[in-house]
Image: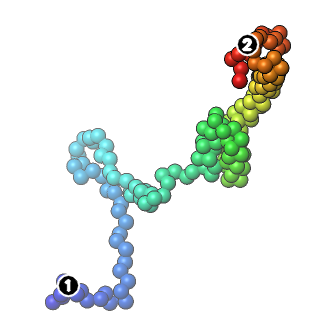
């Protein structure tokens, strides 16, 4: 008599053969030789489904530099120089892995265009405005901050300047 808690080791050295593979029966159980054929019976697949991904593993392969490209794209509207650098880094990472990175390309283009527009805006608007205000201050100092002076054809009330 064998003990269920301590079974005897198998005689072939402990190697247990694998269970036989599942093969579906091609004839349905209700079919008989003389009976008319009913709708075909479908059987289970012979192969099990794929196991789920390991815990903590990404569900799909990620493109290197894609997240950095998205961050660069968002920053390209606010901090153009940082976005340009991050976009270039993201694009290089993606190209090394053999992938395309549209986010990085968009970040590079947008940040470059906005930087050029910022420089043009500085020289076209801000710099002349600063120069004009400096000339107005000098003109008002010359008259003792009283009365009205004309700078570049624009009259300025010096009593409000100080």
**Among numbered discs 2 and 1, the one appearing first in the sequence:** 1
Q: Position of residue 160 (x, y in %)?
A: 69, 17
Q: Quadrant of the image for the N terminus?
A: bottom left
State whether residue 27 appears in this view.
Answer: yes
Residue depicted at x 69% and y 38%: 80
Q: Mark 2 — residue?
A: 157
Q: Mark 1 — residue?
A: 5
Q: Residue furthest left?
A: 1
Q: In the displayed structure, would residue 140 be above or below residue 65?
A: above
Q: In the displayed structure, would residue 111 be above or below residue 61?
A: above
Q: Quadrant of the image for the C terminus?
A: top right
Looking at the image, residue 78 sits to the left or right of residue 3; the answer is right
Front residue of this view, candidates 60 and 15: 60
Say if mark 2 contacts mark 1, CB within 8 Å: no
Front residue of this view, candidates 158 and 146: 146
* Mark pair 2, 1: CA separation: 106 Å
Residue depth check, mark 2 versus mark 1: number of the one nearer the observer: 2
């Amino acid at each position: 008599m064998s003990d269920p808690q301590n079974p005897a080791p198998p005689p072939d050295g402990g190697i247990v053969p694998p269970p036989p593979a599942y093969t579906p029966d091609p004839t349905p159980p209700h079919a008989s030789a003389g009976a008319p054929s009913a709708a075909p019976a479908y059987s289970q697949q012979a192969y099990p489904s794929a196991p789920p991904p390991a815990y903590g593993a990404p569900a799909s392969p990620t493109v290197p530099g894609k997240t950095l490209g998205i961050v660069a794209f968002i920053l390209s509207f606010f901090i153009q120089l940082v976005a340009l650098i991050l976009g270039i880094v993201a694009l290089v990472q993606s190209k090394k892995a053999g992938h395309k990175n549209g986010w990085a390309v968009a970040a590079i283009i947008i940040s470059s265009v906005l930087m050029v527009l910022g420089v043009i805006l500085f020289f076209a608007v801000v710099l002349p405005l600063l120069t004009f205000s400096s000339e107005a201050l000098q003109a008002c100092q010359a008259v003792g901050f009283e009365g009205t002076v004309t700078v570049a054809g624009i009259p300025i009330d010096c009593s409000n300047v100080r």
